[in-house]
Structures are given as structure tokens and as C-alpha cells.
């Protein structure tokens, strides 16, 4: 199937790549077909094993072929125009991260394939997904969230191929990144809204240690202490009894809906009895209860800038912009 010519000026590994591509284009090889083994190509063409491995690695990184342990290599895609393959590891999928993902895809171009995975804030899953995909991609985009020892797992990957997304830990500063500065974001935006906040007798942050960044908690406490405001940090609204005069800062949408339900049960009036600030703006928050005030980063901008960083091979760290949208809930 694959014949290598000498003195053509084309590297032998590239001839292997071109041969397999031609076989796919002609229809001789189709998705799911087994391709010749490394040893078969090596022996028939008197090549080194490394030469064949380089060719197969390129095709594998582009997603054209895949390997199955103990069985060999198979055609995984008939789209030979794919030039690069990106591993994208999110913590979880929600509406605003879907915006980030779509923006990332739109700005990469058609010849780059992105495969998305989720670790769901689980350290074992995080480690396994990285371990199982070492060497299979051109680039790795990692959202470490609050994973402990994330850097130890990420160090297993080629450092020049790694980009950090959303949260950047102190031990990940060697990597290019586009991130949110959670501490300054919450502090600065609460400061902007102080003229509306200071009428409340108490600020309550609904904060999950497992999912929310520590910077958010630090920025919240810094604001409250600076302005000498009474505050409370709770893990959940489950057993919380709402009191008039409280302002709730709610990072998660599920908690926001629970809060609104509790308000209605107590016949509290939004903004008058209970204030609400949510995180990450969506169309729903423009409409619910006449509008919910949000602190939000621009996820479309984040996805676009991440794509540019990869395409241009930029080794930089960029803080993504954020803004405060004041609505009826304050």
C-alpha cells in the first residue's frame, strides 16, 4: 500500500503521510479501516522505526488515524484537511462556557479540530484525562478550576503546547494563559455599585469551596472589611433563612433560582427587601424578575483571544475584561 521513493527531495516520513492521505482520498482506505503496521512499513521500505513513528504521530495529532492497544492503527477521519488537533479540558459545561467554546471554534478556522472533555472538579478524572491523552494533540487547553496539584498533572504535558484557561494558579505562571482575576473583579465591581449596596445591612456570599475560586472569596472579604460592612459566607442556601435587608452575591445559577424561590415564599420584594448580584450574564438574567444585576467576564472575547494566542503561538498571560451590569435586583 505504501511505497517510499529515494532521491525525491520529500522526507520519507512525509511520503508515508502523503501515501495514507492519497489512499483515503481515493477511497481505498475508509473510516474504521486498519492501516499497515509500523513494522510492516519499516520492513518493506527498509526504514527506521522512528521514521514511521513520526509519520503516524503527525496523522494521529491531526485526528486522521488513531491507535488501539494490541490491535494497531485505524483511520479515524476521512477529512485529511485537518492540520492540527486541540485537547480542550473544561470543568463543566453551562451557557456562558458554551459561548466561550463556540467563540473559540469560530476563530480557529476549519482546519483545526477541537475535542472537548470535562473533569467536573474531580482530581482523579482530571489526572486520567491528561494521562490518557499525552502526545495525542498539537495543543492542550486546560481549565484547572480548583483542582489540587493541577500543576503536577499538567507538567506531564509538553510545556510549549499547554494553555491555561479561566483560573491561573501561582504554580502555573510559566504557561501562557487567558484568565479572570477573580479577586479584583469582585472587589472593583462591588466598589462601583457601593452607592446601591450601602443601603443593605448585610452582604451574603454563596460560596462553594469545591467550585468557586478562592480569589472571589478574598475580594469579597476585602470589600466588606474596607467598607466596614457586616457579611456572611455560606456554602448553600439550603438551610438559610432570608432576612430583609440582606444582599446576596450568587455565583451559581441554581443558587440564584433557589434564592428567588425563597424570596417569593417570604413575599419579599426584590431590591427593596433582598438585593441580588449574580455572576456571568445571560439572556435569562436580563428578563428574570425585571433583570438581575451581574458581574460578568466576556466569554466570547475570551474564546476569540484564546484562538488568536494559539494561531499566533503567543506565549503571554492575558487578563480577560469584566464588567458590572446594574439591573432591577439592586
Image (tube, grey):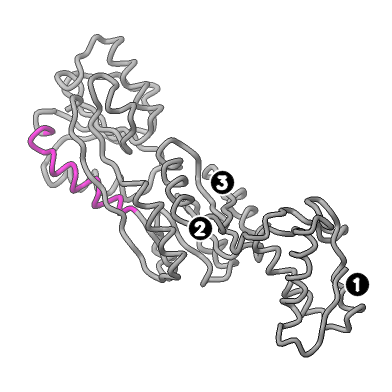
In this picture, residue 13 sits left or right of residue 212? right
- Image spot of residue 61 (x, y percent): 65, 64
Please name which of the two marks, 3 or 1, marks the residue nearer to the observer: 1
Label located before the other in sequence (2 or 1): 1
Q: Which mark is residue 141?
A: 2
Task: Give the distance between the C-alpha atoms of the residues marked 2 and 1, in whole angstroms.
Answer: 35 Å
User: Who's the residue at 81% across and 50% down the image?
Assistant: 32
Question: What secondary structure characterizes most of the magenta part?
Answer: helix
Where are the magenta residues, as a range? 180-197
Q: Which mark is residue 119?
A: 3
Query: Which residue is label 1 attached to?
Result: 40
- Image spot of residue 16 (x, y percent): 77, 73
- SS for dot 1: helix
**Front one among 252 and 227:** 252
Task: Give the distance between the C-alpha atoms of the residues marked 3 and 1, in whole angstroms.
Answer: 39 Å
Q: Is residue 12 part of the magenta span, yes or no?
A: no
**Front one among 127 and 237:** 127
User: Who's the residue at 19% across and 15% down the image?
Assistant: 269
Q: Which mark is residue 328?
A: none
**Front one among 21 and 45:** 21
User: Who's the residue at 39% across and 43% down the image?
Assistant: 212
Whether label 2 touches label 3, CB < 8 Å: no
Location of residue 225 by image quarter: top left
- Image spot of residue 134 (x, y percent): 65, 63
Please name which of the two marks, 2 or 3, marks the residue nearer to the observer: 2
Crowd class of label 1 (few under 14; some 14 to 19; many from 20; radius 10 Å): few
Amino acid at each position: 500500500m505504501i511505497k517510499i521513493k529515494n532521491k525525491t527531495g520529500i522526507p520519507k516520513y512525509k511520503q508515508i503521510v502523503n501515501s495514507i492521505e492519497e489512499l483515503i482520498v481515493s477511497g481505498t482506505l475508509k473510516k474504521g479501516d486498519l492501516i499497515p503496521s509500523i513494522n510492516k512499513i519499516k520492513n518493506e521500505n527498509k526504514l527506521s522505526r522512528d521514521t514511521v513513528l513520526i509519520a503516524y504521530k503527525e496523522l494521529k495529532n491531526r485526528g486522521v488515524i488513531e491507535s488501539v492497544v494490541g490491535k494497531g492503527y485505524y483511520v479515524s477521519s476521512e477529512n485529511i484537511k485537518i492540520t492540527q488537533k486541540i485537547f480542550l479540558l473544561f470543568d463543566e459545561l453551562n451557557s456562558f462556557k458554551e459561548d466561550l467554546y463556540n467563540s473559540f471554534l469560530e476563530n480557529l478556522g476549519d482546519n483545526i479540530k477541537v475535542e472537548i472533555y470535562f473533569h467536573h472538579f474531580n482530581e482523579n478524572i482530571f489526572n486520567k484525562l491528561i494521562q490518557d491523552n499525552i502526545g495525542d494533540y498539537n495543543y492542550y487547553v486546560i481549565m484547572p478550576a480548583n483542582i489540587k496539584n493541577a500543576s503536577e498533572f499538567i507538567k506531564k504535558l509538553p510545556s510549549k503546547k499547554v494553555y491555561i484557561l479561566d483560573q491561573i494558579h501561582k504554580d502555573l505562571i510559566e504557561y501562557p494563559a487567558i484568565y479572570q482575576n477573580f479577586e479584583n473583579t469582585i472587589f472593583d465591581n462591588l466598589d462601583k455599585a457601593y452607592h446601591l449596596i450601602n443601603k443593605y445591612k448585610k452582604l451574603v456570599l454563596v460560596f462553594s469551596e469545591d467550585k468557586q475560586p478562592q480569589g472571589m472569596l478574598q475580594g469579597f472579604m476585602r470589600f466588606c472589611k474596607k467598607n466596614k460592612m457586616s457579611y456572611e459566607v455560606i456554602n448553600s442556601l439550603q438551610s438559610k433563612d432570608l432576612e430583609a435587608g440582606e444582599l446576596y452575591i450568587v455565583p451559581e445559577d441554581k443558587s440564584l433560582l433557589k434564592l428567588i424561590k425563597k424570596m417569593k415564599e417570604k413575599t419579599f420584594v426584590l431590591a427593596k427587601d433582598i438585593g441580588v448580584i449574580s455572576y456571568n450574564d445571560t439572556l435569562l438574567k436580563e428578563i428574570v424578575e425585571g433583570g438581575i444585576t451581574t458581574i460578568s467576564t466576556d466569554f466570547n472575547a475570551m474564546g476569540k483571544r484564546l484562538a488568536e494566542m494559539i494561531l499566533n503561538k503567543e506565549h503571554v498571560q492575558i487578563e480577560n475584561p469584566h464588567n458590572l451590569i446594574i439591573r432591577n435586583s439592586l
